Image (cartoon, rainbow, N blue to C red):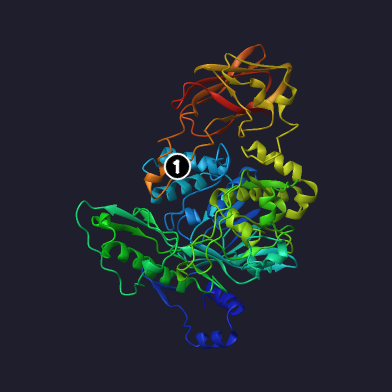
Amino acid sequence: MNKSFLSFIVLIVLLVPINSIQAASDSIVVQNWFCLGTGKNEIPERSKIVNCDVAVIGAGMAGISAAVAAARQGADVVLINDRPVLGGNASSEIRVTVNGVQTLKRKNPVERETGIIEELLLENKKYNPQESYPVWDHVLYDYVYRQPNLRLMLNTQAIKAVMEGNKIKSAFCWQATTETEIIINAKIFIDSSGDGLFAATSGADYRTGREGKAEFGEKYAPDKPDGWVMGESIMMITKDMGRPMPFYPPSYVKKYDAAKAKGRKIKQLKEGFWWVELGSPKDVIADREKNRHDLMAYFYGVWDYIKNSGDYPESANLALEWVGSLPGKRESRRFMGDYILTEKDLLNYKHFDDAVAWGGWSLDEHCPGGILSLDQNPSYFHERFSKVYEIPYRCLYSRNVDNLMFAGRDVSVSHMALSSTRITGTCCMMGQAVGVASAMCVDKSVGPRGIYKSYIDELQERMLREDYYIPNRPANDSADLTKQLSKVWATSTSSGDVKNLFDGMGRDWEDTIHHWQSEGLNEKLYIEWKKPVKMSSVEIKFDTNLHRKIMMHKNPAKNYDQVPGLPPELVKTFSVDVFSKGQWHTVGEIKNNIRRFVPVAFPEMKVSKVRINLKETYGCPHIRLYEVRCY
């Protein structure tokens, strides 16, 4: 018998009651595959072992961020995903908008996340201006595929963790499309799969459901703990056909009683509806197939009401162009770390010395019963924040499995805190943080907790260098040669000061300016040292207007406040010169730049001056920079 098949059956034995296996084994037959190509009976051998430094389980937006961040730090990374496309809830299969901090109660309600998520959104602006979700899938694919040190495996699920004491040795995986079992051996594992099946099989501590008020003193928590989690939804997109389009509901439709529906206003007919939602009072994972069917039934009931009740004559020419078949999930397992982030931490803006991420989406508790509870509002409230809150590193690794980390909605938070931290942009920042930390674990031969105990400052510095922002934590990298500069000047200044480029803050924050801005285009910035310094990289952070949304949306009408194409403030063309051995050398010339953070690398030279020639933007009449570093 095929060894791969036997191993897979052994795995099933570990997960299924023995009497069920005994009954199934009676019907197993040996493969007898006659291969016409060779004229022989062959038993296909489909199994392989993959060795790497870091294994990332789940390639949603958090998993992508984690894998890319680890690979860029030099780790050998394998990223697996159980679906054929990348992006998780943000993929074409589900189509959740890549939201982030955008509801703050302040002058600038939008504070866009930087780093890897910013790179992805800018690439989408460049390569997918038509805002197609299937094309977005391929933008993500290309971004991951071309990353050095990173191997991608799609249609692959990590079914079980193989343990050695308190550490994970291997991930036992099954790739459905190739009928191949894959054993992934790694030093560090990151579960960013959302549901966290792999992490759960390792024995990592987790909880589901809602904590009661007493445990953490959360004012919005229920009086007593219960098993409810926020539900999942399916979405849709419509198309105006220019002629009357009838709608005939499927056989399984569940009638929508609009007269009993509280707070479920149908404001637009282009896309939606998030409130067609179902959770579970006990086990949302076990209930998922039933919920998937019922969500489709309830959705078609809502659409039948819109099309055939007569209350929405504007729907006459509309037809459904796409309806999701895979529900988007908000919550299931939450794995416990050395710290559990709570509602009180968020509302009190608690400062953490080990902060590595931040959020600001409102606390947003949904009705537990979803569409089954029409007498209740689908979202109970939106408690908006006046500033961003911090997320500590201790929430991002397991408290009882020594080499396991998390990113996304499965991190160590209370149910109420999750109502905000689950937002995609926030999850991406957590992903980038654990990606950098995982590579450091490999470099320093320590576990994730060891990074907290001995290297948290270095972790933060590495992240800040890669166009990250950490609240209340300016960068102060002693290796940055600009710490030794003797003089800096520019050909003109209209806002800010050139000295701001070295203050450790890579963005403006409310009314605090951290930029230098020129009067016009074709400007030059000079940096000088008293004595030549050895240098091989100049790293620049440009302006992409982080106070404006740039994410794609299913309903283009919701992008009314966005600017088409790449941000006009972004520098499009520039070059870098260095003064070495008595003359200027051009070490980098960038055309059609689409990145906010651009490192320009070159062979090491002794340099006494750097000149950055800033030539043109994507439309803005001046140049704005936030940071320059030299290494």
Specify the quadrant of the image occupied by residue 290: bottom left
Specify the quadrant of the image occupied by residue 168: bottom right
With respect to residue 145, does 318 lie above or below? Answer: below
Q: Residue at x 66, y 56 (%)?
A: 343
Instruction: Please provide percent x and percent y for residue 424.
Output: 54, 51
Residue 191 visible, this orientation: no
Residue sticking out furthest to the right? 454
Instruction: Please provide percent x and percent y for residue 171.
Output: 62, 64
Residue sticking out furthest to the left? 243
Question: Label 1's element?
Answer: helix
Q: Is residue 227 left or right of residue 452?
A: left
Counting other residues with Cα less than 10 Å from the Cα at mark 1, is it few (<14), some (14-19), or many (20 or more)? many
Instruction: Please provide percent x and percent y for residue 200.
Output: 64, 68
Q: Is residue 278 left or right of residue 505?
A: left
With respect to residue 284, does 599 lie above or below? Answer: above
Q: Is residue 563 left or right of residue 402?
A: left
With respect to residue 237, does 10 lie above or below? Answer: below
Residue beneath disc 1: 124
Q: Nearer the viewer, residue 442 or 138?
A: 138
Q: Nearer the viewer, residue 517 or 139?
A: 517
Q: Nearer the viewer, residue 596 or 437?
A: 596
Q: Nearer the viewer, residue 126 or 48?
A: 126
Q: Residue at x 34, y 55 (%)?
A: 269
Q: Quadrant of the C terminus?
A: top right
Residue 27 visible, this orientation: yes
Please, what is the three-letter code of the amino acid marked with disc 1? Asn
Residue sticking out furthest to the top? 582
